[in-house]
């Protein structure tokens, strides 16, 4: 598979989000926003890896001086995150079915299908 920074699946999710928002498809919007947020969270830098501040006279100044570079995810990383999101939705749909809430089960299953369609 690829070790390059992602452009494929993440870009498709962004385009699908825009289309879903225009179509007012609430389930698709919810699923896509959740998956994109998970991807963004995965890019966050581990707090322990950020250098600690030293003496003030050695501090960088100006806009972005305290910013740490974000992790770059591979296409496989993004795919794994979205697959995990689909699995969670599938599990939730089964749970809602088991407790007799078919409307909630259908809603969550529809969200899983939106993401599953982007993985194909």
Image (cartoon, rainbow, N blue to C red):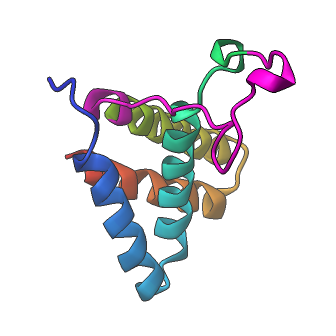
**Is residue 118 something one can see in this rendering?**
yes
Does residue 56 sit above or below 11 in this rendering? Answer: above
Res 51 → quadrant: top right
Residue 16 position by quadrant: bottom left
Mark count: 0
In this rendering, position of residue 96 left or right of residue 90: right
User: 61 or 20, which is in the foreground?
Assistant: 61
Of 44 and 34, nearer the camera is: 44
Q: Is residue 28 found left or right of 58 in the rendered image? A: left
Question: What range is drawn magenta here?
Answer: 52-78
Q: Can residue 89 be spotted in the picture?
A: no
Residue 61, position as x, y percentages in the image: 71, 40
Looking at this view, name the residue that lies furthest to the left: 1
Residue 79 locus on image (x, y percent):
32, 35
Q: Is residue 56 left or right of residue 65?
A: right
For residue 92, side relative to residue 29 (left or right): right
Q: Is 23 colored magenta in this rendering?
A: no
Return the x and y of residue 17 as percentages of the image width and height.
42, 69
What secondary structure prevails in the magenta region? loop
Q: Please say whether residue 71 is one of the residues in the magenta stretch.
A: yes
The location of residue 118, given as percent across then percent down, is 28, 53
Can you tell which quarter of the image residue 95 is in?
top right
* Residue at 55 percent of width and 75 percent of height: 26
The residue lying furthest to the right in this view is 56
Kindly identify the residue that appears in the image at 56 percent across and 48 percent down: 37
Which residue is rendered at x = 56% and y = 63% of the image? 30
Give the residue drawn at x 58%, y 32%: 44
Quadrant where the image shows the N terminus: top left
Rendered view: 3 above or below 20: above
Return the residue nearer the eye: 57 or 5: 57
């Amino acid at each position: 598979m690829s070790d390059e920074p992602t452009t494929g699946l993440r870009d498709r999710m962004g385009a699908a989000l825009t289309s879903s928002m225009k179509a007012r498809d609430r389930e698709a919007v919810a699923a896509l926003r959740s998956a994109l947020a998970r991807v963004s969270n995965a890019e966050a830098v581990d707090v322990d890896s950020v250098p600690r501040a030293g003496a003030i006279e050695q501090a960088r100044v100006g806009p972005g001086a305290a910013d740490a570079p974000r992790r770059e995810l591979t296409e496989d990383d993004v795919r794994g995150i979205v697959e995990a999101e689909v699995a969670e939705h599938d599990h939730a749909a089964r749970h809602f079915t088991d407790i007799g809430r078919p409307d909630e089960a259908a809603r969550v299953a529809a969200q899983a299908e939106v993401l599953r369609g982007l993985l194909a």
